[in-house]
Amino acid sequence: MTARIDDFPGIDTKAIDGLISRGASPGCAAVVSSPEDRFEFSSGAYSDTDRRPVGPHTLYDAASITKLFTTALVLRLFDENRTGPESRMGEYLPHFKNSALTVRDLLTHRARMVCEPLSKMALETPDIRALAERVPVSPAASPHFFYQNATFLFLGIMVEELRGKAFADCLLEMISELGLRETRVGSEDGLDAPPTEIRGGNAWANKTHDESSYLCGGVTGYAGIFASAGDLVKFGRAWLDFKIASPETTGKAFTNYGGYPGEEQGLGWLNTLPRFPALSRDVFCHSGYTGPILAVNPKKDKVYALCCNRAYYGRDNQLYRELWARVLASELIRV
């Protein structure tokens, strides 16, 4: 059964419409999946100049939600015993030969690699392998969470090494297997997504928003997936239905590895979002710089997805977080 999301308890669709009219994003699409039902809602358009309405099948730049796709590929390697959470990265990448960092350290953002922004480095080194060689590797893990793209840069390269094929090909194979027909990678032609930003007076559309991923071919371990809200929910449900990994490995992904308050996270998944109300400890999520969010509650068997292009109104636009709060209202400890 599919129904409008305004039938779903706790979600104020009029408030979402109001946020869109106030500039949270030109448009947004949300889908919520429970065991019995699937609820959909959309508001607004592609952009101020392209007034086509958006909906649950509209492709958006998913930005850092790409990290969950990378995580899925890594967890499948766990199930095949090709690597494991405590395996040292130095077993797979020579760049880590003098480091004690493990796969889990990277998946939980404890590698703390201090370097220039990858976007700046990629202007000089627009090749993913060469870019990785420029990132200094920490000798050991930090006790604290330190969110950065560089960790998933290396995890994507590790997947390439262990699979013996390009990372984009690994993604496309999994996307096809999971039946995600509205999910693409940024290196593909023929995308029709809302523009993510105005750059130099022109709309940046149908190209990966993240500068370093764009310069390095369109997709990396940390950015480059384009997906609809409908497909993000389908991807989230694949996790809950153990289509990503075995129940044992999935259980490891949905375990809290945070050692300090405000640093709660699973493997690849987060439980705490900065500058956002506290989430139920049963919720695992990931957001993207361009505005999307995907969240799952394994205990309730619920999946939430919202897509938008909030950076169209500027990178400082933070109103979109209220869109997240409206869709996740039933999972928040405080709103």
Image (tube, helix red, strand yellow):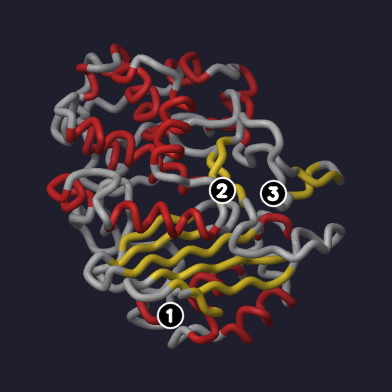
Mark with earlier residue (2, 1): 2
Q: Give the numbered dot on residue 182.
A: 2
Mark 3 or 2, which is nearer the eye?
A: 2
Q: Which residue: 61% across, 29% down?
A: 187
Mark 1 neighbour density, 10 Å: few (under 14) some (14–19) many (20 or more): some
Q: Is residue 248 above or below residue 94?
A: below
Secondary structure, mark 3, is loop
Give the vertical position of 30 relative to 136 (above or below): below
Residue carrying label 1 = 329
Q: What separation in Å lies between label 2 and label 1 (alpha carbons)? A: 26 Å
Q: Position of residue 264 (x, y in %)?
A: 26, 59
Displayed quadrant of residue 94: top left
Tell whether label 2 touches label 3 (CB within 8 Å): no
> Which comes sooner in the sequence, label 3 or label 2?
2
Name the amino acid, label 3: Ala
* Residue at disc 1, secondary structure: helix
Specify the amino acid type for callout 1.
Ala
Q: Position of residue 76 (x, y in %)?
A: 25, 35
For marks 3 and 1, give the CA distance: 27 Å
Which amino acid is tagged 2?
A: Glu
